[in-house]
Amino acid sequence: MELKPIGRLHVLTDQELQGRFTHLELAELAIAGGADTIQFRQKNGCTRQLIETARQMRETCARAGVAFIVNDRLDVALACGADGVHLGQDDFPIGLARTWLGEEKIIGGSAANLAEALACREQGADYVGFGPVFPTASKDDAGPVSGLETLSEVARRLGMPVIAIGGIGKKNAAEVMGAGAHGIAVISAVCCQPDPAEATRRLVMACGIKQNPPGLRGF
């Protein structure tokens, strides 16, 4: 399977931890700060409204040349024409999602240990979201902390992009990248900050991410 270009800073939009910004506003601010991947994360709500919100976000991301991924909801990803979907261990099976989405779309899978990460790879995921690396309050079902040593082992053994998630911010992002992660995914480190655009810029700097020339960030 040919590896797809996977972004290095994934910002997951959220309206449960904060209520100042909409999903679309968070996407715009994160893009302004340098995020190369936006993930729409909304656990509840009317499906039609989720599709409409996702459609607006997809259009915004497309104009900026930024990848747009829908968390959990394969139906919403299909309906809005998203660049891909991210699936948890209890979500739609990765292999079956590939059948529906086709080979060109991005599929990410969540993993909390090496066995789950290897299973994601075998099922056809393009990247693995691994964590939580550090303690986090953003997800109540995050599970036990893995730490940098386990992250390093997974990144070494997997042979595909690993996006670290869980308790990552500007103070520890460099350590995470140094442990072998391809990139990071954040929620509160951007969404819950007074200035999400500036918070994103600081994360880009902390990770040492080089911005790609225009036209190379699209999927």
Image (cartoon, grey):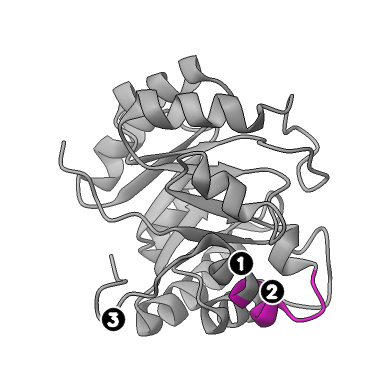
Residue 169 part of the magenta-drawn span: no
Is there CB contact under 8 Å for labels 1 and 2? Answer: yes
Q: Which residue is disc 1 drawn over? A: 203
Amino acid type of disc 3? Answer: Pro
Crowd band around label 1 with a 10 angstrom C-alpha radius: few (<14), some (14–19), many (20+): many
Q: Which residue is disc 2 drawn over? A: 199
Amino acid type of disc 1? Answer: Leu
Q: Nearer the viewer, residue 99 or 213?
A: 213
Is residue 98 positioned above or below 74 on the image? above
**Mark 3–mark 2 distance (CA, rounded to whole Å):** 22 Å
User: Relative to 45, is 161 on the left or the right?
Assistant: left
Crowd band around label 2 with a 10 angstrom C-alpha radius: few (<14), some (14–19), many (20+): many
Magenta-colored span = 193-201
Instruction: Compare marks 3 and 2 and give the one earlier in the sequence.
Output: 2
**Image quarter (top left, top right, bottom left or bottom right) of the N terminus:** top left
Mark 3: which secondary structure?
A: loop
Position in image of residue 193 (x %, y %): 79, 72
Q: Residue at x 32, y 41 (%)?
A: 126
Q: Residue at x 29, y 31 (%)?
A: 124
Q: Residue at x 59, y 64 (%)?
A: 206
Chief SS of the magenta region: helix
Is residue 180 positioned above or below 84 on the image? above
